[in-house]
Amino acid sequence: MLEAFAVGRAVVVSDVPGLSDVVTPEVGARVAPCDQRQLAEALACRLHQPTLVRMEGAAAARHAERFDLRVTLDNLAAETLALARNGRRRPSECYPELPVRP
């Protein structure tokens, strides 16, 4: 998926967790799982509307920048530094469902 975004391709995906988190309406279409008619309509729409495909492809290329490894690592480093500066939280504060060991 991210590879398709990176090269500016519009996508059509099943609306399932993981894909639905990444594919926004600006970059393509999400269709109900196992709905062949909806899938066919989304694909046909893109085959017959090259302007839509170009717009979604351009948006996909911009969207892919959010998933750049450098950006992700920079964000992770910033979050880690913020936690270190503000004091560490106990795991139970972040994840109350975890048992706390004495």
Image: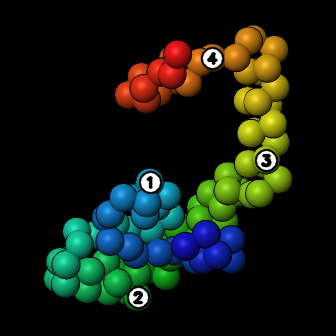
Give me the C-alpha separation between circle 4 and circle 2.
52 Å
Foreground tag (1 vs 3):
3
Label 2 sits on a secondary structure element that is helix
The image quadrant that residue 46 belongs to is bottom left
Give me the C-alpha separation between circle 2 and circle 1.
24 Å
Find residue 47 and name its label: 2
Tell which circle, 2 or 3, labels the residue nearer the N-terminal end. 2
Query: Is disc 3 surrounded by few (<14), some (14 to 19) or many (20+) residues within 10 Å?
Result: few
**Is 61 positioned to the left or the right of 73 in the image?**
left
Q: Amino acid at mark 3?
A: Leu
Discs 4, 2 touching: Cβ within 8 Å: no
Q: Is residue 21 above or below residue 15?
A: above
Give me the C-alpha separation between circle 1 and circle 3.
20 Å
Estimate the x, y position of residue 28 in percent, counting from the top left: 44, 68
Label 1 sits on a secondary structure element that is helix
Find residue 89 and name its label: 4
Query: Is disc 1 surrounded by few (<14), some (14 to 19) or many (20+) residues within 10 Å?
Result: few
Q: Amino acid at mark 2?
A: Leu
Foreground tag (2 vs 3):
3
Tell which circle, 1 or 3, labels the residue nearer the N-terminal end. 1
Q: Is residue 42 above or below residue 2?
A: below
Foreground tag (4 vs 2):
4
Find residue 73 and name its label: 3
Give me the C-alpha separation between circle 2 and circle 3.
37 Å
Query: Is disc 2 surrounded by few (<14), some (14 to 19) or many (20+) residues within 10 Å?
Result: few
Foreground tag (2 vs 1):
1
Estimate the x, y position of residue 47 in percent, counting from the top left: 40, 88
Q: In which quadrant of the rendered image does the N terminus lie?
A: bottom right
Which residue does the numbered mark 1 point to in the structure image?
Answer: 21
Tell which circle, 4 or 3, labels the residue nearer the N-terminal end. 3
Comparing 89 with 44, the one in front is 89
